[in-house]
Image (cartoon, helix red, strand yellow):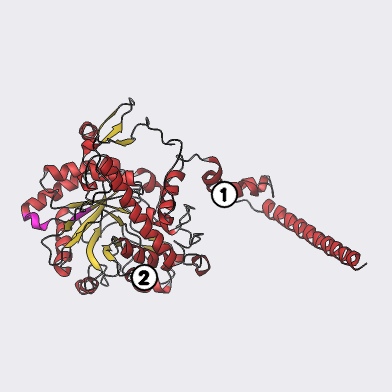
């Protein structure tokens, strides 16, 4: 009897809940019907009340369904599933091998293939990694044997735990972390890693009241032993001709204090430095920063019109090679950002595959390649991409989104909305709770370790002891005819 009583009681409760749910749904449908018919902003909803709402729901969820259900491993943009999967496995330090065969189309124009040697270098032999000095004539030159580094990501665009994890991860990996244009935060300093301080067009952290460089603030930043170099950002690959964009929802009190801007207002950087009107001004600013800080100073830009680089070389010849930037960070038009106008992201600037050989060849022709180190950045998340950049002539690479994947980024494309589900690009403390800096810093370190490890494996396969010894003769690129030619022949044809 007792069981029957509880069963009947459960049926009554269930029936009551069903009736409540039915009436709630009915009221909601009636409300949506009336609201849709009254409004005139969306014709679909007005003409097809209630049902028309599904169109906007499916449109919003389209990215999700394409990413997980409809796209093949090599189809997605900006990064496909095969690329993301390799980064995730490297970051977690799990098996990075694949089976049965490559899913990459090896006859697709633009595909790069490295030429294995009949006499590969033994992986068991110990080979000393080549160290490179940046700014050898500076008071405090920077020396590193690491090839892969963490590209510019500011506190503001990224959350507190994300920047903290990157700082500790960079320290464990022995690579540098670029602060991005948002200034130097306590979280960049937490891991005591090597830092590159970026000076954006708004000069956050080193600006005076008029928006110009403040020498004392520069000196204060340089006093931090972690800050090894300074990078003057002229333009960014994802938005050339446009300054940084940090939506107001992300401008918290802490971020506003670090940047020196009002709380809760959009942080829009100028689209260029106020002081720069010609290449002579660029050289002046480089030397002002270098003289004030005593540390290597370079520039960052995405190439479009290359004539200005020629003029820059002319100005260096007039003043002397010591006036040259210590490095040139070359960004790609398919680089990443937290927020950018689609017109700029889609259609302005040259991708790295075209701009890197142009810059390398130009600096070689002008005798400046040894003086100005080239840091390539823009979608270089895989060992093969890094090997291509080195073979083409880069000295270093820097990756932002590769390290974001290592942090747990799922490419939800919500960086500009403060709703990042992984807590990386949001200041919503609830969403940040799942991002443990200790765990994620280990993953960042793992990713950078295996990026170097597999890069060295490619170099050994090509018969050279160090990835920096890769040249354009070590790789071929597939032409429209389906035939692959060496990189030197391909780029000679491009010119």
Mark 1 or mark 2, which is nearer the start of the sequence? 1
Quadrant location, the N terminus: bottom right
Quadrant the C terminus occupies: top left
**Dot 1, how many residues are within 10 Å of its Cα: few (below 14), some (14-19), or many (20+)?**
few
303 vs 190, nearest the viewer = 190
Is 325 a magenta residue?
yes
For marks 2 and 1, give the CA distance. 34 Å
The residues colored magenta run 319-328
Mark identifier at residue 187: 2
Identify the element where label 1 is drawn: helix
- The reply to whether residue 429 is visible in this rendering is yes
Q: Nearer the viewer, mark 2 or mark 1?
A: 2
Left-right relation of 314 to 386: left
Q: Tag 2, which secondary structure? A: helix
Judged from this view, the residue extending furthest toward the top is: 481
Nearest the viewer among 310 and 365 is 365
Quick check: 134 left or right of 410?
Answer: left
**Mark 1 — residue?**
61
For this view, does 221 lie left or right of residue 3? left
């Amino acid at each position: 009897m007792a069981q029957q009583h509880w069963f009947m009681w459960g049926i009554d409760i269930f029936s009551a809940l069903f009736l409540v749910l039915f009436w709630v749904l009915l009221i909601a449908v009636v409300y949506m019907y009336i609201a849709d018919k009254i409004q005139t902003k969306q014709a679909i909803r007005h003409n097809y009340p209630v049902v028309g709402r599904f169109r906007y729901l499916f449109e919003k969820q389209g990215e999700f369904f394409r990413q997980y259900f409809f796209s093949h491993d090599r189809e997605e943009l900006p990064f496909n599933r095969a690329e993301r999967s390799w980064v995730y496995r490297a970051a977690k330090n799990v098996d990075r091998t694949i089976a049965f065969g490559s899913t990459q189309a090896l006859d697709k124009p633009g595909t790069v293939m490295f030429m294995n040697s009949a006499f590969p270098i033994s992986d068991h032999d110990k080979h000393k990694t080549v160290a490179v000095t940046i700014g050898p004539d500076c008071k405090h030159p920077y020396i590193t044997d690491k090839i892969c580094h963490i590209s510019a990501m500011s506190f503001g665009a990224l959350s507190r735990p994300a920047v903290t994890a990157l700082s500790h991860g960079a320290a464990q990996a022995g690579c540098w972390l670029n602060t991005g244009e948002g200034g130097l935060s306590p979280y960049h300093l937490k891991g005591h890693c090597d830092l590159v301080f970026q000076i954006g067009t708004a000069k956050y952290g080193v600006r005076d009241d008029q928006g110009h460089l403040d020498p004392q603030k520069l000196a204060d930043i340089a006093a931090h032993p972690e800050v090894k170099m300074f990078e003057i950002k002229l333009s960014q690959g994802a938005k050339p001709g446009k300054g940084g964009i940090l939506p107001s929802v992300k401008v918290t009190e802490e971020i506003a204090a670090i940047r020196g801007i009002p709380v809760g207002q959009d942080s829009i950087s100028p689209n260029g430095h106020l002081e720069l009107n010609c290449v002579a001004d660029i050289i002046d600013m480089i030397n002002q920063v270098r003289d004030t800080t005593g540390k290597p100073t370079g520039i960052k830009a995405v190439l479009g019109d290359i004539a200005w680089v020629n003029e820059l070389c002319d100005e260096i010849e007039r003043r002397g090679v010591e006036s040259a930037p210590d490095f040139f960070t070359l960004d790609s038009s398919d680089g990443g950002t937290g927020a950018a106008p689609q017109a700029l992201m889609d259609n302005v600037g040259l991708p790295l595959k075209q701009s890197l050989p142009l810059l390398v060849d130009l600096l070689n022709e002008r005798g400046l390649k040894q003086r100005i180190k080239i840091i390539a950045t823009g979608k270089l998340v895989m060992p093969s991409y890094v090997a291509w950049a080195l073979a083409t002539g880069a000295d270093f690479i820097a990756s932002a989104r590769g390290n974001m994947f290592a942090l747990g980024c799922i490419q939800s494309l919500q960086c500009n909305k403060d709703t990042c589900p992984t807590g990386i690009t949001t200041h919503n403390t609830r969403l940040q709770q799942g991002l443990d800096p200790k765990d994620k810093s280990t993953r960042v370190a793992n990713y950078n370790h295996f990026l170097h490890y597999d890069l060295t494996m490619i170099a050994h396969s090509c018969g050279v002891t160090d990835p920096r010894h890769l040249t354009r003769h070590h790789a071929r690129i597939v032409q429209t005819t389906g035939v692959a030619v060496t990189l030197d022949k391909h780029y000679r044809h491009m010119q």
